[in-house]
Image (tube, coloured by chain):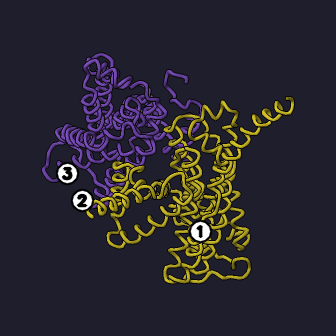
Amino acid sequence: MMGEQKNSQLNKIQAPQAQLELMRISLQRGSKIKAQEIIFWVLALTTPLLLPSHAMMISEIAITALFALSLDLVLGYSGIVSLGHAAFFGSGVYSAALFAKYFLIDPTLGLLVCATVAGLLGFICSFTVLRGSDLTRLMVTLGVALIMLELANQMDWLTGGSDGLQGVLMGPVLGQFNFDLQGRTAAWYSLVVALVVFCFVRMLVNSSWGYTLRVIRDNRLRAMAIGVPVSKILISVYTFAACVAGLAGGLLAQTTGFASLDVFGFDRSADLMLMLVIGGVGWLYGGIAGAIIFKILQSELSAVTPQYWMFWIGLLLIVLVSVGREKIKGWFTREYLVSLLTASTNKSGGAR
Amino acid sequence: MLTILFDGLAYGMLLFVLAVGLAVTLGLMNFINLAHGAFAMLGGYTTVLLMQRLGAPFLICLPCAFLVCAVLGAVLERTLYRPLYSRPHLDQVLFSIGLAFMSVASADYLMGSGQQNIQLPQWLKGRTELGEDPWTLGMGHYRLFIVLICAVLTVILQLTLSKTRFGSQLRASVDDPVVASGLGINVNKVFLLTFAVGSGLAGLGGALGAEVLPIDPNFPLKYMIYFLIVVSVGGTSSITGPLLAALLLGVADVAGKYYVPKLGGFIVYSLMIVILLWRPQGLFSRSTK
């Protein structure tokens, strides 16, 4: 009798535990590395060999993808609408360029420096995005980027003002690989840094911290109610995203040896948002896919009409939004393809 | 000093007329429209074209600019904007950035990338000085004209919104579109009209201010931030909020550029951030939510 009771009690305890186990498995499903991902990164890392003449472009795409990844953390995972992400990117660009010019030419140390600088800026700015509506956040983030632009413009004794900072010389990566003119080292350097950061971000996003981000995005009130320290988490994600953006900026400065005011520009933030939206928000590969599509489109279209590239990108945005982002994304999902296939086989089956 | 104050006021008034349409769409209809500056630019270009090609007088160009922009605003509202009212803010931002980008490129293509200047009529070129030396008030007639027109417009707008039947219909439609349409208000028509008038006013502002805010293809992006500052700092619950914010911004900007030219933009943006952090709903809004 007693044993039976004990057993049933055990069952009662075990049942939720089994459920928990199931939940954990389903949550961890996303963190399992898929074969496609490995193939993608191997392909990406071999592109400088396959397309040596496009090495600079590959490097640029890797940098942009990293930058988009940073915005995805803020916008896609945490739901903070930001139009001023270029502030962190630009601060990374300038800190990397200045560090190389006045202190050390070692790229790895330079990256650490620019991530720190951008992270500090992000930490300070994170307090500005905690409260208010979407509009307030939009304005504040935009304002920060404009202030940075203004600062870089006015402090011309340091930043070169509107002439930009030219002639930044870089030492060899890890003391081994010199930056060459074709940009092959640059491409690999950017790709490897992007891969390392990506893996780290991937791990973070699939951790409990990453899930908390999504909880906050989906329902902030409820997140607070179940005891999520909303402000702390948002501050941490904003700071971290700023670090990543700073890294991307640092890479740009190091691979091109140049820093100019347009890194703070509104266009850059807007383009970035566009890339992310093309690729898909709240999905780590979204930023990467968007960066690849955007950069290739840009180079193709602006080869045809250099000034009016903006027109096409505007048109693309309008169509994208008017048709509906979800709908377009739906066209590329497996379910849709499967349903198409089954529909066609059904039809052919009926014909038979 | 008084002259600077006056110039600032004129500038602020102009900003108000430019931004009031945005205040309505953003505040009342809760739509983030970053393409508002495109309408202002269109108004400016309409004036430039009318005056240069057809030799039309300045005073006739103003209502023309209003009409052109209002019609275009109505068409765009009907075709593109309306489906987006219920969408998330991110979609609205993306859409209107796209529209702004397109307008920039089209203006560049059609009109060239240079700045367009308008020839002011003779009677607007004069300048009146009042008072003794340290307190001299120099009023350019053109700026005086701007202040006058904008003041009249403000009064008309305020009265329309608070006193007329249309004003109450608009407020009802905004508060609860479902109930409003249940009461027999044609909500779509009300929004359409409001949007058209807002765009028209932007066009009028662009035409009126063509001398102060030079018209070039980058206009929508260059002044977008100013319009947004006016609306977000002023709060969106009334007309007077944006008006005061616009005046404040105008005076701060003109004075800042005059006294500390190196820090001009810096001051304005920092002020905006501080104010928004202090009162996220806007400086002059009543609700303290």
Q: From the rendered image, report the letter of the chain displayed in yellow.
A: A
Q: Is residue A23 above or below residue A162?
A: above
In the image, residue A116 lies at what x, y percent?
Answer: 71, 57
The residue wearing badge 1 is A35
Residue A35 or residue A162, whichever sits in front: A35
In the rendering, which numbered label is found on residue B110?
A: 2
The disc numbered 3 marks a residue on which chain? B
Q: Earlier in the sequence, mark 3 or mark 2?
A: 3
Q: Which quarter shows the N terminus of chain A?
A: top right
Left or right: B52 as drawn, with respect to B11: left
Gap between marks 3 and 2 measured at Cα: 11 Å
The residue drawn where x is 36% and y is 69% is A301
Gap between marks 3 and 1 measured at Cα: 60 Å
Q: Residue A164: which quarter of the image?
A: bottom right
Left or right: B239 as drawn, with respect to B108: right
In the image, residue A346 lies at what x, y percent?
Answer: 33, 59
Three-letter amino acid code of the residue under disc 1:
Ala
Q: Residues within 10 Å of mark 3 (few under 14, many from 20)?
A: some
Discs 3, 1: same chain: no
The residue drawn where x is 25% and y is 62% is A351
Q: Residues within 10 Å of mark 2 (few under 14, many from 20)?
A: few
The disc numbered 1 marks a residue on which chain? A
Q: Residue farthest to the front?
A: A1
Three-letter amino acid code of the residue under disc 2:
Leu
Q: Is residue A24 above or below residue A307?
A: above
